[in-house]
Image (cartoon, grey):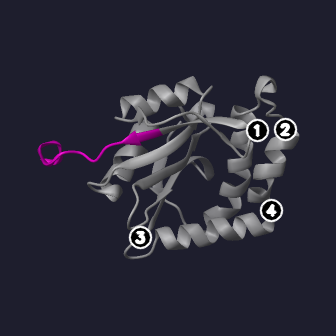
Amino acid sequence: MTYVITPARPEDAAALGPLHLRNWLLNYPNPEAGIDEPWIRERRGASATAEGIAQWREFIESANGDPAPRFCRVVRSGTEIVGYLCGHRNASEPVTLGPMYLLDHAQGHGLGGQMMTAFFTWAGPAPVRLGVVDYNDRAIRFYRRHGFQVAGERYLWRGRLPTLPMIREAPSAADRG
């Protein structure tokens, strides 16, 4: 299978909204935490609606601006979008990474690392933060490999989803070459 990473295009919003919901439904159900399909659909189902798709389109258009306060790359396999990495920056805060997802069949090909490299180039020398579900061990290991460390106490996103804050400190001048 051939995969290509490209900047997201506004027309990709129609695929990204439903893919975002699909990934939540595949990766986050946890009966012990009270995370089930209805809970996920209540909190993330809007991403697959016309309004959610319009928000994705707006995000993508902003990511394609100059300067770009947002970042959004997609992984394509033929005409199908099989993953994405997005993020944003605010002037006084660390850059925020997320969401980031790859469908299972697209994992293990180095695509996540390639997207992270592009993201770090966009982020520049700023620190980068993210939140990761604390029972998503694979994602935690991935982020650690890319320089992130747990940065604070576990919290409950929307009162239920156990989340770890992670940060990748700004690289030193020596690290930047």
* Quarter of the figure with residue 175: top left
Crowd class of label 4 (few under 14; some 14 to 19; many from 20; radius 10 Å): some
The reply to whether residue 75 is visible in this rendering is no
Mark 3 → mark 1, Cα distance in angstroms: 30 Å
Residue 68 is labelled as 3
Mark 1 touches mark 4? (CB < 8 Å): no
Amino acid type of the residue tagged 2 in the rendering: Glu
Residue 49 is labelled as 4
Residue 37 is labelled as 2
Q: Nearer the viewer, residue 137 or 78?
A: 137
Looking at the image, tell me whether mark 2 or mark 1 is earlier in sequence order: 1
The residue at the far front in this view is 153
The reply to whether residue 18 is visible in this rendering is yes
The x and y percentages for residue 122 are: 34, 58
Mark 2 touches mark 1? (CB < 8 Å): yes
Q: Secondary structure at mark 3?
A: loop
The residue at the far bottom in this view is 66
Mark 4 touches mark 2? (CB < 8 Å): no
Crowd class of label 2 (few under 14; some 14 to 19; many from 20; radius 10 Å): some
Residue 25 is labelled as 1
Looking at the image, tell me whether mark 3 or mark 4 is earlier in sequence order: 4
Q: Nearer the viewer, residue 61 or 158?
A: 158
Looking at the image, tell me whether mark 3 or mark 1 is earlier in sequence order: 1
Looking at the image, tell me whether mark 2 or mark 3 is earlier in sequence order: 2
Specify the segment rendered in magenta: 166-177
Mark 3 touches mark 4? (CB < 8 Å): no
The x and y percentages for residue 3 are: 49, 43
Q: Residue at x 60, y 31 (%)?
A: 105
